[in-house]
Structures are given as structure tokens and as C-alpha cells.
Amino acid sequence: LIKHPASTFYIYVKGDSMIDDGIYSGDIMIVDKSLNPKSNDIIIAVINGDFTVKKLYKKNNKLFLIPANKKYRLISITDEMDFEIWGVVTHTIHHCR
């Protein structure tokens, strides 16, 4: 599950914005910081100090973060935002329910 141990970390999921992609609150995500994020990757990002997990979408030199739950809207990344990608989600470990 881990190709780059020195640049891999684990993070617990809190929330329901990615449930349609099978990522649920309480799951553990394996995240690789060494991967170059590309369009359609699921990423961990920080926007104005808040962590989020979303699908990255790039179009015409613009970045968008797309949730996998119709309750939430996509986020258009602007120059005014403090935005950083922390890594690409490579695997998710589900909590037994």
C-alpha cells in the first residue's frame, strides 16, 4: 500500500463530502506527498487553514475541488485563497461497521 514511505502519512476522515467515492467518516486515508497531483486525483488540501479532501480538477489553468456528495458545491480555487495541496490519496481503509 505504500510506495514512498518517507513521504507517506495517514489521516482519519471526518465528514461526508466524499461518500459517493466510497470515502466515509472514520476511514483512514493513505496519502503520498511525493506524487504530483493531476486532474481527477483525490487530494488532501488546506484552504485558508481548513483541511479538506476532494477530487482535483484542472481546466484552462484553473483549479477546482469537487466533492463526491451532491450536498456540497465545488470549490473554485482563487488567488485570494491560502491554498496548498498536502498530498494525493492513494488508498482508503474502511472502518468495520
Image (cartoon, rainbow, N blue to C red):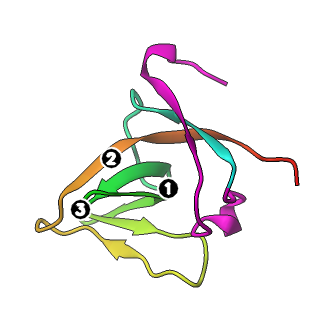
Among all residues in the image, which is located at the extreme left? 80
| Distance CA(mark 1)–CA(mark 2) | 14 Å
Earlier in the chain: of badge 3 and badge 2, it is: 3
Residue 28 higher or lower than 53, as above or below: above
Asked whether disc 3 touches disc 2, contact meaning CB atoms under 8 Å apart, the reply is no
Magenta stretch in the rendered image: 1-25
| Magenta stretch contains residue 15 | yes
Mark earlier in primary sequence (3, 1): 1
Frontmost of labels 3 and 2 is 3
- List x then y, in percent, for residue 76: 30, 73
Left/right placement of residue 78 relative to residue 55 reads: left
Of callouts 1 and 2, the N-terminal one: 1
Residue 85's mark? Answer: 2
Q: For the residue labelled by badge 3, is the local secondary structure a helix, a strand or a loop? A: loop
Q: Residue at x 79, y 47 (%)?
A: 95
Query: Which quadrant is home to the C terminus?
Result: bottom right
Residue at image x 57%, y 69%? Answer: 17
Residue at (59% x, 83% y) in the render: 70
Q: As drawn, is 4 to the left or to the right of 96?
A: left
Residue 91 percent coordinates (x, y): 65, 39
* Residue type of the residue flagged with mark 3: Asn
Residue identified by numbered label 1:
40
Residue named by callout 3: 48
Tell me the residue at 45%/81% (across/down): 73
